[in-house]
Image (tube, rainbow, N blue to C red):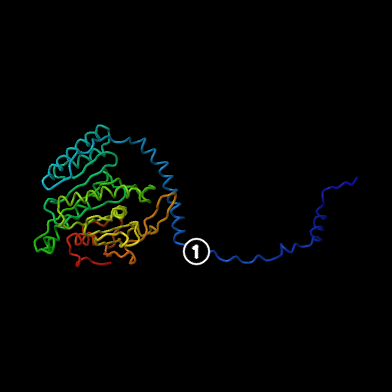
Amino acid sequence: MELRGKPTAAGRAKAARTTPPDPALERPIPPQPPKPPPTPRARFLRRLGRTLLAALVTAAVVVPVSAAARPRIPAPAPAALAPPTTATLDKSYTANRANAEEASRMAAAHGDRTRAAADHAMAAPSRHFLTFDGRGQGLAVEVLGDLAHADRVAVLVPGSDTTLETYGRFRAGAAALQDHLNSLDHRHGAHGAHGSTSRPHTAVVAWLGYETPGTVSTTVLTTGRAEDAAPPLKRFIRELRGVVGEKAHVSLLCHSYGTVVYGRAARGLDVDDIALVGSPGTGADSVSALRTSARIWAARGADDWIVNVPHVHADLFGTTVGFGADPVSPAFGAHVFAAGTGGHSDYFKPGSVSLDNLARIVLGDTSEVTRA
């Protein structure tokens, strides 16, 4: 029998010296060609994946906690009203103020003082609502100015995170626009409708007619909320024409996700001018793809973070994510106007370049609009 013990250190050293080298191990590794840089689409999908993951985690943690902390707020059903006419505007305003006051009482009884205060403010005698619905996030369509006699009307469509609780910020922009319209009218004697030299009568409508997405949510990345909003926006414009008539000049001013809403409602929408501000895209690749006869304007402030949003779109799991071409790019084909140094929430800020240009678009002073 042969007995074998463990090799000694000397034996191992000798074996190492006598073992021939393996040529495969000695062969130099050829350099690998550099990987091509990722395409814009690949970068977008990678960034989108991280955003979706963050949003889903946030939703998984925040939404259940919020729902547990704040149950659904009770509110009355909206007032049952026929489409408004010049003769029934006051009736609509009165009914919706009463509905807002009742919503305030119900929210207060429920213990939600924030919503109760917001609803109560909307029930003030000076407020004029064509629509009020205190249920859920809430819907509200408010008129600033004399709509019955207006021949120049601006309709504002808001972006994400606009609810009854945050409505005050949205309304402040509408009020700033109405004040500036009045200021320009008195100083410069802007032309009335159809080139007349009489002073125009203006009105601004703050249209919170859809359930806006949350900024920190997956819904803000897709067109779902915009698709739901398009039919009520089209219906509202038709009803608005029933009040102001076909000769009135109607401008639609859309902010942020509101521009996505317009993209879904564009075809057949009876408006004269469209302004897209702070837009992540409309879902269309160009003005011609919107299939509208309206004049399209676009602007972005120098400090608007929306510039970092990739302007591409992709189909994921049967859902279109992203909103396509940048409306301020030359290829899109819009009339690009100056918006100054403001950020994403500054387009309707009093004294801003963007507000001045938006007012001139509404008044028809297009030769006075400063271009970017």
- Outermost residue toward the left in this view: 198
Q: Is residue 168 above or below residue 306?
A: above
Q: Is residue 104 above or below residue 36?
A: above
Q: How far from the left and from the top, in percent, is residue 238?
A: 20, 50
Q: How far from the left and from the top, in percent, is residue 363?
A: 17, 60
Q: How far from the left and from the top, in percent, is residue 224?
A: 35, 48
Q: Quadrant of residue 280?
A: bottom left
Q: Quick one: SS at disc 1?
A: loop
Tag 1: Cα neighbours inside 10 Å, few (<14), some, or many (≥20)? few
Which image quarter holds the C terminus? bottom left
Q: Is residue 197 above or below residue 254?
A: below
Q: Is residue 82 above or below residue 182?
A: above
- Outermost residue toward the top in this view: 109
Q: Quadrant of residue 181?
A: bottom left
Q: Nearer the viewer, residue 277 or 124?
A: 277
Image-based side of 276 in relation to 97, left or right: right
Instruction: Inspect the image, locate mark 1, and give the three-letter code of the amino acid beneath it.
Output: Pro
Residue at point 38%, 40% (across, down): 63
**What residue does disc 1 label?**
37
Q: How far from the left and from the top, in percent, is residue 139?
A: 25, 43
Q: Quadrant of residue 352?
A: bottom left
